[in-house]
Structure formats: C-alpha cells, structure tokens
C-alpha cells in the first residue's frame, strides 16, 4: 500500500506537525475541555478533507500530526480549527468566557508548523541522482 493519497489530478503526501497554545498558555486543556478540543479537532479536520494521524491535547498546548491535501492551506486549516474550537468551548463551558482575561479569544495568536517527510539527506541524494541521470540522457539524445 502506498503512503501517497490520490485526488483527481494529483498524487500527494503532505504531512505536518502543528503545535499551538491557549491564550497566555493557561493550563486549561484538561478533563472535559481537553476532550471537547480533541473531538472538535477531529471533526473540523475531517470536514476540510484532512486526516489526523496523531493528536495529543496536553494541559497547555496541542500537538497535531495531520495529512493535509494540497488544495488546503495550513493557515486555512488552523484558522478553521482554532476558530471553531474556540466558539465551541465558549458555548459548552460558559464559565471560561466570564474570566476577564479571555476577551473573546481562547487560543493564542500563531502556531508552530513543521513539515514531516523524507529527511534532507535522502532528498539531497535523490536530487544528485536525478542530475546524473539527466546528464546521461543528454549524451544519448543526439
């Protein structure tokens, strides 16, 4: 079985490790709040056509390993996930919104994203091999 996914005109394997935190990095992601965040991320990623590979909701941050199709940008994905989970959390747990420091924001601005895939050394070897292969083909293409 191939690690690649298929869309109508593309074969792809785009995997990202994303980390983000609640506002002020409060340790609020525990118990029912953590479970709701976990469920929301699964649902909203699925709606955007993304596949959650690993998800870990810790008390003060979230780790998400996700396959994202090329038609979806990371900023669109995180905008939807963070925005919709915040709305859902404030609706499910109104006592959180009443604290004066939240404002209308559950998550801190920004996130950390890293691509996951073939390591750099393997890519260098691949590129080097391709260059040699093309040079060989040029000699015979007279």
Image (spheres, rainbow, N blue to C red):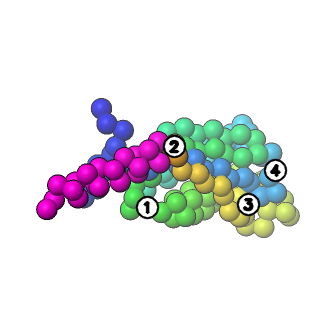
Q: Which residue is mark 1?
A: 72
Q: Is residue 35 above or below residue 74?
A: above
Compared across the picture, whether 59 is left or right of 51 comes to right
- The residue under the point 40% across, 46% down is 126
**Disc 1 secondary structure class:** loop
Q: How far apart in space, not on screen, are marks 2 and 4 (Cα)?
A: 39 Å
Res 57 quadrant in image: top right
The residue stretch that appears in magenta: 122-142
- The residue under the point 29% across, 55% down is 135
* Residue placed furthest toward the right: 100
Q: How far apart in space, not on screen, are marks 3 and 1 (Cα)?
A: 22 Å
Q: Determine whether label 2 and label 3 are within 8 Å by CB.
A: no
Q: Determine whether label 1 and label 2 are within 8 Å by CB.
A: no
Whether residue 36 is visible to the viewer of this picture, yes or no, is no
* Residue placed furthest toward the bottom: 103
Instruction: Give the percent coordinates (x, y) of residue 39.
Output: 56, 43
Q: Determine whether label 3 and label 1 are within 8 Å by CB.
A: no
Mark on residue 140? none
Which of discs 2 and 3 lies nearer the camera? The answer is: 2
Viewer-closest of 33 and 113: 113
**Disc 3 secondary structure class:** loop
Q: How far apart in space, not on screen, are marks 4 and 3 (Cα)?
A: 10 Å
**Disc 4 secondary structure class:** loop
Q: Which residue is mark 4?
A: 26
Q: How far apart in space, not on screen, are marks 1 and 4 (Cα)?
A: 30 Å
Which of discs 3 and 1 lies nearer the camera? The answer is: 1
Q: How far apart in space, not on screen, are marks 2 and 3 (Cα)?
A: 35 Å
Q: Residues within 10 Å of mark 3 (few under 14, many from 20)?
A: some
The numbered mark, 4 or 3, whose residue comes first in the sequence reads: 4
Mark on residue 108? 3
Q: Quarter of the image containing the C terminus? A: bottom left
- The residue under the point 65% across, 55% down is 112
């Amino acid at each position: 079985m191939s690690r690649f996914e298929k869309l109508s005109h593309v074969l792809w394997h785009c995997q990202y490790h994303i980390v983000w935190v609640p506002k002020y990095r409060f340790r609020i992601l525990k118990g029912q709040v953590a479970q709701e965040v976990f469920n929301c991320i699964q649902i909203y990623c699925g709606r955007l056509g993304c596949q959650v590979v690993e998800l870990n909701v810790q008390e003060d941050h979230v780790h998400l390993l996700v396959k994202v199709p090329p038609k979806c940008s990371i900023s669109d994905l995180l905008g939807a996930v963070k925005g919709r989970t915040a709305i859902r959390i404030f609706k499910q747990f109104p006592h959180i919104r009443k604290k004066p420091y939240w404002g209308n924001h559950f998550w801190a601005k920004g996130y950390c994203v890293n691509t996951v895939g073939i390591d750099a050394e393997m890519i260098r070897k691949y590129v080097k091999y391709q260059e040699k292969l093309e040079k060989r083909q040029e000699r015979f293409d007279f």
